[in-house]
Amino acid sequence: MNPRPFLPAVTAALLVFSCRPSLRNGDYTLTILTTNDVHSTWFDSTYVGGGIRKSLFAMNHYIDSVRTADGPGNVLLVDAGDCLQGDNAAYYFNYVDTVTPHLFPRLLEYMKYDAVAVGNHDIETGHPVYDRVTADLKKAGADFLAGNAVRNDNGQTYFPLYKMVEKAGLRIAVLGYTNANIKAWLSEEIWSGMHFVSIADIIQRDVDYVRDREHPDVVVATMHSACGQGDGTILEAEALDAFNSVRGVDFLVCGHDHRPYVETRDTCALINSGSHSRYVGHGKMHLKVEGGKVVSKTFETDLIPVKAEMADSLMRAHFQQDFEAVKAFTLREVGILNTDLWTRDAYRGMSDYMNLIHTLSLGCAPADISFGAPLTYNGHVGAGILTYNDLFTIYPFENQLYVVQLTGAEIKDYLEVSYDKWVNTVSGPGEHILQIRQSDDPRTQQRGWSFINRSYNFDSAAGLDYTVDVTKPRGQRIAITALADGMPFDPSRTYNVAMTSYRASGGGNLLREAGIDPDALAARTVARYPEIRNILYDYLMENGSIDPEVISAPSVIGTWRFIPEKLASAGISADMQLLFGK
């Protein structure tokens, strides 16, 4: 159902106690099961080596057991987005086999999902994919919802705002929202025809509208937005903002930050089930009705660890043909790798992994310079025959490559910002050079050492010769001596710089912190290329192999290093041991 005119707020009493006149007196119990950020972990197989993993198949085993115990008519199943990206299966049905009905809606129909919020990585797939999936999900009975994705032409929502569901004898309104910060990560052509507004700015109005129009007994909001701090300062993390302020929502389901988290209050419960099929969120709502009104309600919330080995065998058999098609695509040989690639080597300095990414970028005319970061925290691809599956480890996202114009001064300022997120300013031996800390990881529930900032924002540059002085503060660390071809580097000259579409759209906030307005880069964009994984594939089709001496040519990619070398080498080695062990 699509929106909502501006309506006056209904009374607080109606918000808290509204129910349809036919609701009978008695006790009601609704079970809500939640998932989010599954990132295409649909199959329980790793495709290679006979390994198994947590998956929708394993989640369905638990979901079916709950339906058996509580009654299928008493269980609501919703997802908070980021479904269509992250694994070979999604890629295959998004872009390779576009004739067979898309697998994701068929999976959700099999599992009897009721509704799904749109995630930013779902939007990232592009109009042809998510428009197709939206229509298929509607037919499957699991609407794609995003009430804050607003059409530019008429002000209505691009996706439905809400869906009405009957469960446990109750009328349930499920409202859905996508991440409001999409503009900062994705190029506009991907989400053309719409814009995104803050969830916190509109959710109360939406809840009031839906309660006034539909008179639901229960309201559930599922949003692809991180928990955040609850202080209204982080546009991509509005779940706790809404949880702290909105009236009339009973369950709030969120995601995006991959942080398993539950919280229960007197009037509302919040569930974030983490990511990658690791947990199923499990909530219960107990309502007591007297005189046709809800007079009390209580909540239970829990996170249920998913057991990979408990995959639903009937579901596996049902989708075996789809799995075999994806597996055949995944195991297709695409070339030879003549060196081991470790993404973690990028944190030390120049590495074969980043040299490859930079070489690909600089091969896209008219790029003079390349910015790039490791997008897999600790990925490894061994030397030998490469399959298409390996390309997902080398480059896991569907980022496009842009070439934009920056001045030499802007390039230097940008690198100062990047390395300031990466390294500390130290005065001598024994200090942490990498910005790391020992803490509890809310995503894994384990204590250990980790980077303070996101490593996928640790951009280095190629096409330049430069040093990074770890004894100097931000603004004084970077010394650029020349271009890779030996020509002088001129701060006043304009250069063509290759970077991902994520970065060019403002992702990671590096551009803005360097004083470069991402919104103004459209006019300074001189070339756009396809997804970087496709550029890698084309490179292998043309060259047949990845050779360290080719991708590391100083005359092409230049050189960079941390200095003072002895201090930096010892300190970074010690920090790397804390992060990854010996």
Image (spheres, rainbow, N blue to C red):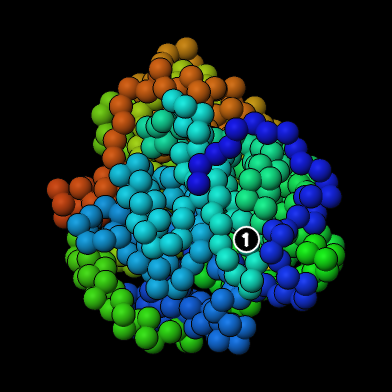
The structure residue drawn at horizontal position 76% and vertical position 47%, both measured from the top left corner, is 246
How many numbered marks, from 0 up? 1
Pick the residue in front: 380 or 376. 376
Q: Compared to 538, does 334 lie above or below?
A: below
Q: Compared to 123, does 510 lie above or below?
A: above
Residue occupying the far top of the picture: 492
Asked whether residue 243 appears in the rendered view, the answer is: no
Q: Is residue 396 left or right of residue 205?
A: left
Q: Quadrant of the C terminus?
A: bottom right
Label 1 Cα neighbours within 10 Å, binned few <14 / some 14-19 / many ≥20? many
The structure residue drawn at horizontal position 47% and vertical position 27%, both measured from the top left corner, is 154
Q: Is residue 179 left or right of residue 93?
A: right
The structure residue drawn at horizontal position 30% and vertical position 54%, both measured from the top left corner, is 94
The structure residue drawn at horizontal position 50% and vertical position 38%, both measured from the top left corner, is 157
Q: Which residue is mark 1?
A: 172
Residue 162 percent location from the top left of the image = 56, 50
Residue 436 percent location from the top left of the image = 68, 54
Residue 260 percent location from the top left of the image = 66, 65
Pick the residue in front: 361 or 239. 239
Asked whether residue 311 appears in the rendered view, the answer is: yes
Q: Compared to 251, does 278 lie above or below?
A: below
Amino acid residing under circle 1:
Ile
Mark 1 element type: strand
Residue 278 percent location from the top left of the image = 56, 72
Pick the residue in front: 419 or 310. 310
Q: Compared to 258, does 3 lie above or below?
A: above
